[in-house]
Image: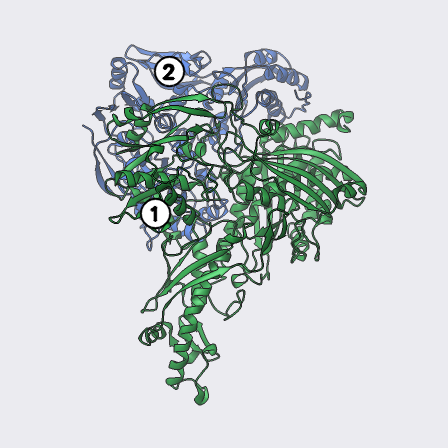
């Protein structure tokens, strides 16, 4: 057995190949959950009745009129539930609620022969509500003391001592908006029941096992009676880690009740109003620096808006606390976290999982404090980067901290930062109504689930008699290229060409008890499991091959034959080490192995070693390793409107030794643009008035919730992966890539801050709302401009 | 009759049970052509894009076919009777990729793949654009397609690598043949009637006899009503096939633009001749929308945030309304009477828009929105200025997004006319402009920002278009 990170001299890992489904994608042949429904006979369609109140008790629910609508077959209510009426893992998410907890909460579901009939049926249902007071904003929840879940504190050192010794102390508050996942494929499920009463649910889910468990507990069935399959998702981004369960359960319940296949697909408006989003956060903070601008102490309270139920808010908060240091060493830290309970959608996992919110707090602090410290923001950041030997506030050594400095200096050089900073200064001096900003920010992101038990994975690898290979693993494909990487891992581990390996859809009856495909860990965990399975099979084949090779007398190995350890598998050939010319076809070895009664399949398993985490004390080593990156952004802001352009972006990111460079580049670029969307454009608005629509999501359509389009792509976009970056202890030396690049986008926000400040006098401190929409930038630059006119105000 | 026929991916198909609100997307998916996806159902994301065959030449001219990309979620199937559609499945299949598909696939242009067939279609429309040079790529071709995964760079790379279609390329050859001629359609169903007359008189008769009939041109607004708000019409009259609504003519004293021309057609036929329109058109929604949307539709729905009214108000446009009784012409500045209400009677059809000539020598259009492409304005301002020496002879300023209707900034215009065009005049007029309308707070922008943008756009116009040094007031 080789160690996990070592790569054979030849193999499919590291090749820049297209997504395994690329040809199916571009031709429209790739099928998604709802595409499967069209192909079924006798299908029923589901439509929710959504409550028009943010908080209300259902006092009467009379569904009979719906059944009178032609085509309506059933109305699912709490009375239909044979098991537990709950769609969550915390038992705080009733599937059919008696108390409406947010505007749009689904009270019951209509099943009909067509979607139109189901909708018309829902319109006929008679429902009465007793309207209750609702908390809609974070501010209201904090004032009302409305919190849920635990309230952890991350602590190191003595912040009071830190402040006492600080040359500069600043305080502030910061509020950041949430983000809608806006996966292009909305949540969807398709359920059937077979002749033995087995429930089969196809679901667009990142967590098939949990979907299976929720479906089973709603139906009152053991897990073995429910199979969940996810062919692929049209995007997930964390939004399908917990949210799909209830919809899968509704479809499954409908299928059980009616005996017919049931299709449930949320339209965009339903998906936006029903499902959880990235948590908005409020932060209040106090920070101390020494006379050189080094961070001495940080005291902060982070309050997330968890929405109506707990969902994943606790682990999201834990990750926010664990990332408030981002890439900076802070000797004294005291950070409190709490989760507000509001009458909104249940906020949930979203790429970065609290990490972005934590990191944004410290980056906002540094961006705001730099002018007051008399330092350029990039210099302030560089001075505070972790150095080798330092540890995080939760006690984990920052291994490979030197990569931060390396990334930083390399990227400054590659982006010609110093020269461009001069150009920006000259441009700004010459242009009264247009200003540019240039900023660099770092990323350090911990990889592994904070929840230690999730750091395990399974795989099932079959080698058929003809030498073809079929792999199953517990991870799901949402566009991140996991399946592509897993094919590369299997082909490499077995030494066969990629074309020999096929991957079957993720199913809970193939690999049980899987973890969510989340926390960027899909390739690390499932890759480890697949490699394990392949190596078990390869070891058995090596025994066969060693015998075969020696019996054939072809190998120049003397009379003793060769040892199985000296058998090599490469390019579909099996040969004695050093003698590729003497080899056999992989296929031949497999054929012989079968006839020698050798097991040709294996279950693989992987658990991330060396993790420990004390949730109460917020101490331990929750992460296998850190991912690093840095980004430089240059923006140009129009002083008349606050509108801006992203002129140039340079990214340098550490993915270890890439398993699949085209995939990884795509993750880095896509993550960056999605992060830029969160920080600049994507603006969730709820009706916070006291009017009849209180609590209604005002941005509940693509026409009102704007994500980045072609016009937001940087005009120059240079993206590179850090070279020679082997990560020991991870499959083939690679690193996770899903989430960390999102936080590279913080440099866009910081560049905007600098451009806005450039409208003001030197040293002006720009306070910038998040998201930094053109309106927010306009107010920031207006404040700066006015400060230039009235220096007394600026000094305030 | 509740059936129509159309050509899909080269094969003739009959669609049965077609209702007035059946969308092309819904029907395609029911046929098993599930490559086209519903991402938003309102023409914002492009995941449902398909190619349609349309005449390449102007009305009444001989000519081949142009392949245009549309959002199939907004296309009502009944209006496509006799039409021709190509979906992503029709361009290529695994193992036999179309050149556009190959470029996207090999360059990492798909991640989750859900938006991808729509991108393929938009790219294919660009690939087959007649006036495209081989290395040329108009980024606006992709302005109506959203991707949540890639960050777009590989898609742009694919677009820039396209090259020209091979001489034997089937669709390139298809362009040489005429497009299918419009078919008169009369669909009568228990859930409503759908008419697509080809004669103006017939359309006007229908409107006179069926009060409350829904007039359908490009459908980019009505389709959204159908999909998102589940609006259903008893009678729908599609006017896109009426030749009288498809003219574009430069007369001595006016430019007349047919109400049912798509904005893309207007863009092509004007070829930059009207600078304010040329500045405005690329900012109107996206290419996918402009391929359907019409001036008649934009003025007919009379949304206070529609982007054509401010421009047409600044140009002093008049609306030509036709009915059985004949035509009348009303100034656009009097046409809007309230929130989504206008002077148009139910028996009238917007036939054309007339813009007086000569056009203003100085003009500018300012769209304030969160996103540069494919967004709805929070404020839109259009300015048309005539100077005599350095004195303002006349000026028209059209505003959108600051009141229940689009409106002329009359007080600001008065503050400018007869005064020298200088920094002081502009600053004073900008203050007046700031107070025009009654802007609201909503999810797009605050009232304060909207008011500030009114002021700022006049300053921006003065600085950028006339080179004046401008100064600011303290923000409110």
Residue found 51% across the figure and 22% down from its top? A133
Q: Which residue is mark 2?
A: B320
Q: Nearer the viewer, residue B463 or B69?
A: B69
The quarter holding residue B70 reads top left
Q: Position of residue A778 (x, y in %)?
A: 63, 29
Q: Chain of mark 1?
A: A
The residue indicated by pointer 1 is A31
Q: Which structural element holds mark 1?
A: loop
Q: Quadrant of residue B181?
A: top left
Q: Colour of chain A?
A: green
In this orientation, which residue lies closer to the viewer: A101 or B339?
Answer: A101
**Secondary structure of the residue carrying numbered label 2:** strand
Instruction: Report if residue A169 is visible in the image.
Output: yes
Residue sitting at x 48%, y 69%: A10
Chain letter for mark 2, please. Answer: B
* Badge 1: residue crowd in 10 Å (few <14, some 14–19, many ≥20): some
Q: Residues within 10 Å of mark 2 (few under 14, many from 20)?
A: many
Residue B368 % position (x, y):
54, 27
**Colour assignment, chain B:** blue
Question: Which image quadrant: the C terminus of chain A?
Answer: top right
Between residues A11 and B321, which one lies in front from this camera angle? A11
Q: Is residue A571 visible?
A: no
Gap between marks 1 and 2 measured at Cα: 49 Å
Q: Tags 1 and 2 in contact by the CB under 8 Å rule?
A: no
């Amino acid at each position: 057995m080789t160690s996990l990170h070592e790569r054979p001299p030849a193999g499919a890992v590291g090749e820049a190949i297209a997504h395994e489904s690329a040809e199916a994608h571009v031709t429209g042949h790739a099928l998604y959950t709802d595409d499967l429904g069209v192909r079924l006979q006798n299908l029923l369609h589901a439509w929710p009745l959504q409550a028009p109140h943010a908080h209300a008790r259902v006092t009467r629910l009379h569904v009979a009129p719906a059944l009178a609508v032609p085509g309506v077959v059933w109305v699912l209510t709490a009375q239909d539930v044979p098991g537990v009426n709950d769609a969550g893992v915390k038992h705080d998410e009733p599937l059919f609620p008696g108390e409406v907890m947010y505007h749009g909460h689904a009270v019951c579901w209509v099943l009909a022969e067509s979607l139109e009939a189901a909708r018309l049926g829902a319109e006929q249902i008679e429902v009465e509500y007793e309207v209750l007071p609702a908390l809609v904003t974070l501010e209201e929840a904090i004032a009302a003391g409305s919190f849920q879940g635990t309230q952890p504190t991350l602590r190191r050192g003595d912040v009071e001592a830190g402040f006492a010794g600080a040359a500069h102390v600043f305080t502030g508050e910061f509020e950041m908006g949430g983000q809608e996942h806006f996966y292009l494929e909305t949540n969807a499920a398709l359920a059937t029941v077979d002749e033995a009463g087995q429930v089969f649910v196809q679901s667009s889910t990142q967590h098939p096992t949990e979907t299976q468990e929720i479906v089973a507990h709603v139906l009152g069935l053991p897990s073995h009676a429910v199979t969940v399959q996810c062919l692929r998702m049209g995007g997930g981004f964390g939004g399908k880690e917990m949210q799909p369960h209830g919809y899968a359960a509704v479809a499954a319940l409908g299928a059980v009740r009616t005996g017919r296949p049931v299709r449930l697909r949320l339209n965009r408006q339903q998906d936006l109003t029903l499902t959880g989003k990235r948590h908005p956060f409020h932060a209040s903070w106090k920070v101390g620096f020494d006379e050189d601008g080094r961070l001495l102490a940080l005291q902060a309270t982070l309050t997330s808006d968890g929405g109506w139920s707990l969902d994943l808010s606790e682990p999201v908060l834990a990750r926010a606390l664990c990332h408030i240091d981002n890439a900076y060493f802070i000797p004294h830290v005291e950070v409190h976290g709490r989760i507000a309970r509001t009458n909104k959608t249940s906020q949930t996992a979203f790429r970065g999982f609290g990490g972005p919110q934590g990191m944004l707090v410290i980056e906002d602090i540094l961006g705001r404090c730099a002018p007051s410290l008399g330092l350029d923001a990039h210099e302030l950041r560089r001075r505070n980067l972790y150095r080798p030997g330092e540890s995080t506030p939760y006690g984990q050594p920052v291994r490979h901290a030197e990569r931060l400095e390396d990334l930083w200096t390399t990227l400054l050089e590659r982006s010609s930062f110093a020269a461009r900073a001069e150009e920006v200064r000259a441009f700004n001096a010459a242009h009264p109504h247009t200003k540019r900003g240039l900023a660099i920010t770092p990323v350090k992101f911990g990889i592994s689930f904070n929840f230690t038990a999730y750091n395990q994975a399974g795989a099932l690898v079959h080698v058929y008699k003809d030498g073809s290979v079929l792999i199953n693993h517990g991870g799901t494909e949402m566009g991140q290229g996991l399946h592509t990487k897993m094919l590369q891992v299997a082909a490499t581990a077995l030494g066969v060409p990629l074309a020999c390996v096929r991957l079957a859809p993720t199913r809970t009856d193939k690999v049980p008890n899987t973890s969510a495909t989340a926390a960027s860990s899909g390739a690390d965990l499932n890759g480890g499991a697949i490699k394990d399975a392949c190596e078990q099979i390869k070891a058995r084949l090596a025994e066969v091959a060693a015998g075969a090779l020696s019996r054939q007398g072809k190998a120049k190995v003397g009379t003793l034959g060769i040892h199985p350890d000296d058998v090599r598998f490469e390019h579909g050939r099996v040969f004695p080490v050093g003698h590729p010319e003497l080899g056999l076809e992989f296929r031949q070895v497999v054929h012989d192995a079968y006839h020698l009664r050798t097991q040709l399949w294996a279950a693989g398993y992987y658990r991330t070693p060396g993790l420990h985490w004390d949730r109460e004390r917020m101490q331990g080593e929750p992460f296998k390793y850190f991912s690093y990156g840095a980004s430089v952004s240059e923006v140009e802001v129009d002083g008349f409107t606050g509108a801006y352009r992203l002129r140039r972006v340079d990214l340098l990111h550490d993915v270890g030794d890439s398993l699949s460079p085209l995939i990884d580049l795509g993750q880095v670029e896509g993550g960056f643009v999605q992060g830029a969307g969160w920080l600049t454009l994507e603006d969730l608005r709820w009706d916070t008035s006291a009017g009849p629509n209180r609590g209604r999501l005002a941005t509940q359509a693509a026409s009102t919730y704007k994500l980045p389009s072609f016009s937001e792509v940087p005009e120059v976009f240079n993206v590179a992966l850090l070279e020679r970056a082997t990560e020991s202890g991870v499959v083939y030396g690679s690193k996770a890539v899903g989430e960390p690049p999102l936080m590279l986008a913080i440099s866009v926000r910081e560049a905007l801050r600098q451009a806005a400040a450039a409208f003001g006098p030197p040293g002006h401190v720009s306070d910038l709302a998040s998201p930094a929409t053109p309106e927010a930038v306009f107010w920031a630059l207006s404040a700066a401009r006015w400060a230039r006119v009235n220096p007394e105000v600026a000094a305030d | 009759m509740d059936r129509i026929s159309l050509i899909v991916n080269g094969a003739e198909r009959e669609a049965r049970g077609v209702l007035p609100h059946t969308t092309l997307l819904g029907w395609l998916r029911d046929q098993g052509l599930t490559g086209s996806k519903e991402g938003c159902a309102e023409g914002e994301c492009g995941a449902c894009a398909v190619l349609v065959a349309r005449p390449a030449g102007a009305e009444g001219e001989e000519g081949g076919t142009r392949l245009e990309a549309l959002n199939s979620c907004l296309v009502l199937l009944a209006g496509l009777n006799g039409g021709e559609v190509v979906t992503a499945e029709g361009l290529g299949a695994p193992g036999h990729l179309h050149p556009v598909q190959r470029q996207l696939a090999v360059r990492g242009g798909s991640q989750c793949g859900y938006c991808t067939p729509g991108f393929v279609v938009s790219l294919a429309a660009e690939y087959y654009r007649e006036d495209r040079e081989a290395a040329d790529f108009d980024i606006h071709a992709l302005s109506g397609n959203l991707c949540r995964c890639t960050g777009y760079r590989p898609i742009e790379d694919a677009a820039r690598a396209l090259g020209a279609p091979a001489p034997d390329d089937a669709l390139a050859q298809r362009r040489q043949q005429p497009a299918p001629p419009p078919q008169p359609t009369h669909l009568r169903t228990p859930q409503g009637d759908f008419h697509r007359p080809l004669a103006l008189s017939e359309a006007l008769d229908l409107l006179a006899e069926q009060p409350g009939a829904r007039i359908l041109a490009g459908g980019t607004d009505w389709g959204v009503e159908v999909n998102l708000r589940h609006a259903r019409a008893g009678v729908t009259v599609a006017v896109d096939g009426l030749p009288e609504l498809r003219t574009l003519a430069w007369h001595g004293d006016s430019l007349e633009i047919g109400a049912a021309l798509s904005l893309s057609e207007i863009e092509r036929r004007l070829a930059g001749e009207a600078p304010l329109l040329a500045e405005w058109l690329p900012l109107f929604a996206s290419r996918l929308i402009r391929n359907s949307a019409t001036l008649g539709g934009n003025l007919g729905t009379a949304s206070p945030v529609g982007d054509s009214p401010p421009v047409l108000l600044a140009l002093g446009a008049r609306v030509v309304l036709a009915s059985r009784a004949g035509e009348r012409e009303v100034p656009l500045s009097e046409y809007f009477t309230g929130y989504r209400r206008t002077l148009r009677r139910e028996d009238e059809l917007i036939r054309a828009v007339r813009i007086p000539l000569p056009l203003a020598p100085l003009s500018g259009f300012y769209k304030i929105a969160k996103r540069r492409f494919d967004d709805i304005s929070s404020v839109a301002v259009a300015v048309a200025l005539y100077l005599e020496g350095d004195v303002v002879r006349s000026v028209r300023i059209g505003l959108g997004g600051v009141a229940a209707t689009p409106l002329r900034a009359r007080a600001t215009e008065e503050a400018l006319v007869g005064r020298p065009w200088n920094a002081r005049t502009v600053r004073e007029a900008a203050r007046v402009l700031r107070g025009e309308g009654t802007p609201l707070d909503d999810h797009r922008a605050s009232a304060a920002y909207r008011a500030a943008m009114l002021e700022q756009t006049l300053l921006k116009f003065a600085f950028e278009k006339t080179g004046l040094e401008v100064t600011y007031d303290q923000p409110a």
